[in-house]
Amino acid sequence: MSTEGGPSLTEDEFRRLAHETADLVVDHLTNIRNGPVFRVMPEAVRTRLRTQELSDAPAPAAELLKDIDELVLPYPMGNGHPRFFGWVNSAPAPIGVLADMLAAAQNPSADVGDIAALHVETAVLGWFKDLMGFPSEAAGILVSGGTTATMTGLAAARQWVAETDGWDVRRDGVDPPDGRRLVLYTSEEAHSSVRKSVELLGLGSSALRTVAVDDGYRMCPEDLVRRIEHDIEAGERPFCVVATAGTVNTGAVDPLDAIADICRRHRLWLHVDGAYGAIAKATPRTAPKFDGLERADSLSMDPHKWMSVPIECGCAMVRDGELLRRTFAYVPPYLQTEEGVGIGGPDFAEFGFQQTRSFRALKLWAVMRQMGRSGLRALIENHLTLARELASLIAHDPLLHLAAPVGLSIVAFRYVPSGTAPEAGWLDDLNRAIEAAVQTDGRVFLTSTRLQGRVVLRACVLHYGTRSEDIAELVSVVRDIGTDLAKHLDPGETHA
């Protein structure tokens, strides 16, 4: 292990530092509840991190660990804390942290070969096919996250429409020979990754049609049909619908079965963005919400969201596995292998954009095996229960108003002072100020979003260690901070 120069360590030094690192990790995760969810980084620390010079002399490894302990670990994003309710970022399962370290130690490029990394990935993709109701001939690939998974699914949709209409998109680009523009549809509540993918794939954001949502923030099938028929009459080529199984604003699940019927009737590709919510199909309590998901042509999921798998770990699944291969496959001579000969084995690079790929599958494999189906169901159901507990506390508090139905584990609400109309414009400024003050306060953490043009507070229950008392603390902190801020905010000087 020890060589002259470079990043080598002696065996004894490596072992000692590995034990010290393990202690740092355990201390960080086990003591995290006792500290603030988020702390503002002192300017001196920020400056030291941002302006660190690379010296000519090597730095001792022990000194580097000390710097990490002092400068990095005390200033996390906060999602490791049980009272973190912001965005859709879960805490890392401890077994996933350990598996990630072991994957890094092996450090394979998980693209091609008869190596453990690819067989582990094959196994977990098979588990997802089963959980989501996809057929055995479907193909999937682990990617960085939901954005890349969505782009992968929409790239397959672009390949499908080109093959269906008789042109070669990989050779000729996005230029249908019949002159019709490709258009696709998604709801007002769709994730930003849909638009980013559409732009990057050369379709143009002007080709993306926004479909209205109902009172539950779910895509309206009737409006979808109207828009499709209008585009057909206008000489466009509708080819894809992107439905959402768990929006990031409210956790709404689009009516997937009805949308799948529309797609079949009009010969459209159905992509389901299930990055946050699709895994809730695994529990009987919420499985009916996802009826129709198994009919999707492609699906994006994020195990690093609700499943507590350490970042990065997303998943793209395509019903027609060979189509996914045709979308991406290109094997240069220096990478060509033959199964059963030498290292020859599976080639995951044929199913996605990346060539060099990290061993993401090991941490996912470890977390899923540790929980099993029953543990996964229990995790999801506990979060569903806590979200409804939060919604109940809000509904019974005269200063807090629910802003949307609770679909999964996200609760959207507003602070509204006594005697103030819920639609008052100055409440946007107040609730935005509450968000910032709560984050800085450190006892809990939440974020905000906009629903129907209004700023609302948003709490996502996602930590495996969150308890009822954490939910109660969230309500108490928001109420106290909101009451204090409302005293000092002059409605006459604010603007919506």
Image: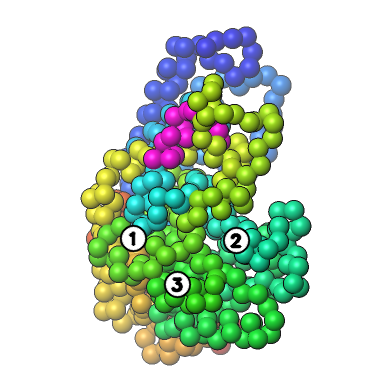
Left or right, residue 367 beside residue 142: left
Q: Look at mark 3 in the image and give the residue it sits on.
A: 260
Mark 2 crowd level (few <14, some 14–19, many ≥20, 10 Å Cα): many
Q: Look at mark 2 in the image and give the residue it sits on.
A: 160
Secondary structure, magenta segment, majority class: helix
The foreground one among 404 and 176 is 176
From the viewer's perspective, is residue 328 above or below residue 414?
A: above
Q: Is residue 116 magenta?
A: yes
Q: CA distance from mark 1 to mark 2?
A: 29 Å
Proximity of marks 3 and 2: CB atoms separated by less than 8 Å: no
Residue in the image at 30% along x and 57% along y: 282
Where, by quadrant of the figure, is residue 350 drawn? top right
Q: Which residues are magenta?
A: 111-123
Q: Look at mark 1 in the image and give the residue it sits on.
A: 280
Q: In the image, residue 157 lies at what x, y percent?
A: 58, 61
From the viewer's perspective, is residue 316 above or below residue 460?
A: above
Mark closer to the chain start, 1 or 2? 2
Left or right, residue 124 beside residue 239: left
Q: In the image, residue 208 lies at what x, y percent?
A: 63, 73
